[in-house]
Structures are given as structure tokens and as C-alpha cells.
């Protein structure tokens, strides 16, 4: 199925879509951190790559990545509609994530990437261990 909008118009529409405050990702992590007494983190700080959370004292940048948008190896799906576009888009996102990780590490930051599926009840205990270890280093 072809898009009803021109490429320029679709780009304009998509540029207005913002992912901040997504309940399934960032707000779920806020809730997990608060319930477990983990403090010292901040959101929306001016750091390269725009981490979802940072802990300045530990120089830790935390990203919460949606399984679809960032190409989770467990849950990655390739849409059949407009397949070439989506493969290119998701692969670009994955490449950008690697580049951001490298840049932050060169600047002395440590990077913790959390997949959306790790925020489920089933994985929370393991995720808390990962977060605490990252904060202790």
C-alpha cells in the first residue's frame, strides 16, 4: 500500500511524534527506581545522545529502548508493509545507538541500555541487579 502523503509531508508528520513519557518504558523505569529506593538519577538532561536517565555521580547514562524501534534481538519484527523503509529505519536506529554508546564511553560515561521487555514483572529482579551493579562501579 502506498502512502497517501508525500515523503516531505510524512516526514513533517513523523517529526511531531515524540516518545518521552511512554508508560511502557521510561515511566515504568521511574516507578521501578522509586519503589526500590534508587536515587540520584535525573531525566531530560543535556547529554550527548539524549539518555532517558543519567546519574551524574556515577557518570552513568541509561537508555530505555523500545523492542520494535531499536531492533531487540529477542522481539525484533520486520513489518511486511513498506518493508524496505522499516528495515532501513530500524537498522539506522541500531547504528545510531552503537555510535552514541561509543561516543559516551569515550567521554568517560558508562552506558546501560534497558530493553522494553526487561521492564515486565518477570524480568524486574534481574533488571534491578543490573542497575545496582552499574551504579556501584
Image: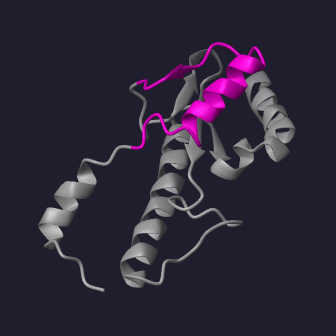
Indicate whether residue 36 is drawn in magenta: yes
Residue 72 in which image quadrant: bottom right
Q: Residue at x 47, y 84 (%)?
A: 80
Q: Residue at x 66, y 25 (%)?
A: 31
Residue stretch rendered in magenta on the structure = 19-45
Count of numbered circles on the image: 0
Q: Is 124 on the left-hand or right-hand side of 97?
A: right
In front: 94, or 101? 94
Q: Is 104 on the left-hand or right-hand side of 59?
A: left
Instruction: Report x, y in % for residue 44.
Output: 43, 26
Instruction: Report x, y in % for residue 123.
Output: 82, 45
Q: Name above or below for residue 70 compared with residue 102.
A: below
> Can I make out residue 109 in this image?
no
Q: Name above or below for residue 124 compared with residue 89.
A: above
Q: Is 79 on the left-hand or right-hand side of 30?
A: left
Indicate whether residue 112 is drawn in magenta: no
| Screen quadrant of the C terminus | top right
Instruction: Report x, y in % for residue 32.
Output: 71, 27
Q: Residue at x 43, y 37 (%)?
A: 20
Instruction: Report x, y in % for residue 27.
Output: 57, 31
In front: 89, or 4? 4
Q: Name above or below for residue 73 compared with residue 44.
A: below
| Screen quadrant of the N terminus | bottom left
> Can I make out residue 15 in this image?
yes
Q: Residue at x 45, y 56 (%)?
A: 96
Amino acid at each position: 500500500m502506498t502512502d497517501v502523503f508525500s515523503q516531505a509531508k510524512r516526514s513533517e508528520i513523523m517529526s511531531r511524534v515524540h516518545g518521552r513519557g511512554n508508560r511502557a518504558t521510561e515511566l515504568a523505569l521511574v516507578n521501578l527506581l522509586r519503589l526500590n529506593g534508587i536515587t540520584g538519577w535525573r531525566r531530560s538532561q543535556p547529554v550527548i545522545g539524549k539518555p532517558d536517565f543519567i546519574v551524574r555521580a556515577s557518570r552513568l547514562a541509561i537508555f530505555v529502548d523500545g523492542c520494535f524501534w531499536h531492533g531487540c534481538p529477542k522481539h525484533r519484527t520486520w513489518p511486511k508493509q513498506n518493508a524496505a523503509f522499516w528495515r532501513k529505519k530500524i537498522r539506522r536506529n541500531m547504528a545510531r545507538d552503537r555510535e552514541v554508546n561509543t561516543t559516551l564511553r569515550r567521554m568517560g560515561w558508562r552506558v546501560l541500555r534497558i530493553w522494553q521487555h526487561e521492564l515486565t514483572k518477570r524480568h524486574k529482579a534481574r533488571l534491578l541487579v543490573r542497575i545496582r551493579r552499574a551504579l556501584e562501579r
